[in-house]
Structure formats: C-alpha cells, structure tokens
Amino acid sequence: MRKKYEWFKSIVLILLSVSALTTFAQPYTDSVYRHEIKSVEFYNSTKKASFPLINLNSGETVTLGFDNLAGGTLNYHYTIEHCDAEWNPSNISTAEYLKNYNDDRILNYSYSIATVQKYTHYELTLPNENIAPKIPGNYILKVYDDSDPTKLVLTRKLYVLGPKINIAAEIVPSSDNATRQTNQKVNFTLDYGSLRVQNPNRDVRTLLMQNNRVETAIMNNQPTYIRGTQLIYSDVNINNFAAGNEFRHFDTRTLKLNSQNILHIYRDTANTVMMLTDPDRNKANYTLEYDLDGNYYILNQDGTDPRIDADYAHMIFSLSTARQPNTGTPYIVGRFNDYKLDENSKMTFNTTDNKYFNTLFLKQGVYDYTFVWVDKNGKADNNALEGSYFETENDYQVLVYYRPAGARWEELVGFRLLNSTKK
C-alpha cells in the first residue's frame, strides 16, 4: 500500500511540475543573456537595420552579427524554432518546420583589428544549406554555447512570410479629439481571396507594431465588419498609437573629433565620450528632426570594415528634467539594447549636478535612443520625457497570422510596412 502511495505521489509531483512549466513559460523575446555579448545586429541582408523578414523559399536571407568582448574563439551553435503570433513555441516536431539539420555551428568569425577594445565578431546568414524553414510563421533564432540549448547566448525574432492575404492600410489622425494632436491611428483591410477562412474571429489575427517595438504592439482578433472576402478593421476605438517624438541620436563614426550631440572625447587606455546633456522634450510644440526610427548602424569613418575595426567607447549620457527621483526613474533605450528596462539602461540621479546619468559601452556608429520614465509603481511612460505629436515620423509593421480550424501551427500570411509621412 505504501509503495502504491509513493508511486501515486511521484506521478502527482511530475504532473504539477509540468503544469508549472506550462503556466509560467514566457514567450520568446529579443534578448542577450551574456554581458560580454555586444552590438547584436539582425536584419534582412539586403539592407542593414531593416525588419528581419524574408519570403519563404525566395532566396532572401537575414544576417546576424554580434561581438564577444572576451575575445578568443568560442563554440557557438544555433537553431530556429517555430512560434505562434505571440511568440510561444508551436510545440511541433522540428521535422515539420526545419529542412536538413536541427542545429549548426557558427563558423564565420573574425578578430578585431587595431582597436583599444579587443573582441571577436561572429556572423551568420539564414537560411543556409544546413538550417532553413519549411513553413511560414514566426521563428525564434537561438544562439547557445557548447552545443547546449540551455546555455543561451542570445535570441532574435525572425519573420518568414508565405503571402496569401492582401493588405490595404492607411495612417490617419486619431478619431478622439482629445488625442488628435498626439496620436496616429492605423486603419486596414485584409482581403483573403480564396484562402479558407471559416471564422475570421478565430482563423485570422493581425499584429500592429510601431517601429518594431513589441511593448506598444496591438493585436487585432476581431474585424470591425466583414464585406465578402474583406476583413475591415476601422473601429474608432482601435489601433490608436501615441505618436511619440523623433528619436534622439548621436554619431561616433569617428573618435578623432566631436560630432553631433558629443561634448568631449577622451582617448587613453580606453575611449570615453561625454555627451551633451539631453533636455526634457515634453513641450507644447513638435520640432522636426531626422532619425532612424530607433535603429542603429555600426560604422567607422576611420577604417575599412566596421565589423572588426570599429572600436568601443564608454558613452556618458546625462538628462536634465524637473522630475525628481522620489517620483520615478528614467531609462535610456533603443534598438541597441532591445528597449530593455533593466539595470543597464537605468539612469542614476546625481544630487551635485541635479541631473540623471548613465554610462553605456557601445561600438562606433550612428545610434537612435529615447528616454522612458518609470514611476514608483513600475508603470512605464514612453512619452513623459519625450512628448507625443501627430507629426512624428514612424514606421508601422502590419503582420497577419492565419490558423484555420484543426491546424497545429500558425502561419504568417501577410505583411505591410507603413510610414506615417510617406504615402
């Protein structure tokens, strides 16, 4: 009887542990898991900093590049895993979504040349002869150490499109008078043609992102109304984005002289760049500035190959605002740090200067960044220090996902890139 009880108890514990893993599993994100990994770039190979999307079986590729500041040569492996629209694993066999092999080693690496900070640069192109997707959808690219998938180094989101739906979309002022001067609204229509859509509320959903920022993305599960094979999303209360402000930026393509937004450059045993103090920009009126929509480019005017001859510098940022540290904390974010609100992006208040400071170790290039205010309750506000203006130039990504009744995975079947100032 006791043996039977112990057997039953062990089964219950196993089931509870599996349930806990299922309940608390987190969706995949763009993340870096090692402090020595820097300057991660991931883009469609035709254009740097572009949205990492390819058409299935089209010959298009994406490029991944990153540096390891520890130097030397490490044994990095990689794979891609199919996910649903919310970046949860699809839980299907690798044979169903991968061609050839399940994982492979990164063999393309180079050592830095004539830099103060030594590093090894790794590069990878996908799809390739060893790893390639079979079906459309979201894929998470995983890079890990020692052939062990549990030793994650970084993850990146890859979008593989199998176009089956036409998208018509436009950006208009907010329908709400209270936000007409601060927001941008996206209306769109999907035409699924001959695609089998029995229940639009279940079979199709559409994700809208502003400047590829997942924290402000909006998922559309239900059309406003249906007209034949067209699904129309135009309700006055949906897809209304705070337009924000143009990104702040700096230029370190050369460390020999001061350039945009740089106060002073110190070059000794390490490179240190003192930035001009940033002001609080939450003002009444919009000011036109040209930006990169949050992106960054690794560049070096004094070298020939910025992948291996661009150097690193300690970038000292400062922010002047009337907001006091007892009410919250500012964070400095952009694509360069995946918009992560963590200890690395957190700014510290200096009572002597009455300013907030942070130091980031960044590779030479041109960078966009912005400040996010997080109050004492942990609520993030993207516009508290930047303001929000309808005139702001923004990119919007429209991604359409399809999963008919009985299907075991979700496919990416439509994509459209919009710009708020370009028709």
Image (tube, rainbow, N blue to C red):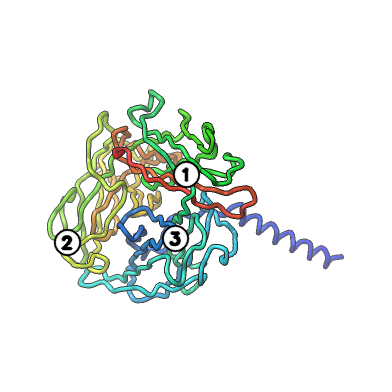
**Which quadrant of the rendered structure holds the N terminus?**
bottom right
Q: Residues within 10 Å of mark 3 (few under 14, many from 20)?
A: many
State the residue position of label 1. Answer: 207
Callouts 1 and 3 close, C-beta under 8 Å: no
Which label lies toward us, 1 or 2? Answer: 1
Q: Residue at x 20, y 53 (%)?
A: 251
Circle 2 residue: 301
Judged from this view, the residue extending furthest toward the front is 194
The answer to which quarter of the image holds residue 297 is: bottom left
Residue 370 place in picture, x, y as percent: 31, 45
Taking the spot 37% from the left edge, 45% from the top edge, the residue there is 417
Whichever of callouts 1 and 2 sits on the residue coming sooner in the sequence is: 1
Q: Which residue is mark 3?
A: 155
Q: Judge the density around disc 2: few (<14), some (14-19), many (≥20) Cα neighbours within 10 Å.
A: some
- Residue 178 visible, this angle: yes
Judge whether 16 appears above or below 209 on screen: below
Is disc 3 placed on a helix, strand or loop? strand
Labels 1, 3: front one: 1
| Left or right placement of residue 410 versus residue 361 in this view | right
Q: Quote the CA–CA distance across marks 1 and 3.
A: 20 Å
Confirm or deny contact between disc 1 and disc 2 (CB under 8 A): no
Measure the C-alpha gap from mark 1 to mark 2.
38 Å
- Of residues 343 and 60, the one nearer the viewer is 60
Position of residue 61 measured from the top left corner of the image (x, y, whole percent):
38, 62
384 left or right, relative to 154: left
Give the CA separation, mark 3 to mark 2: 30 Å
Report the amino acid beneath label 1: Leu
Horizontal arrangement in the rendering, residue 221 relative to residue 30 (left or right): right
Query: Relative to 363, is 209 above or below?
Result: above
Q: Is residue 157 visible?
A: no
Q: Report the amino acid beneath label 3.
A: Thr
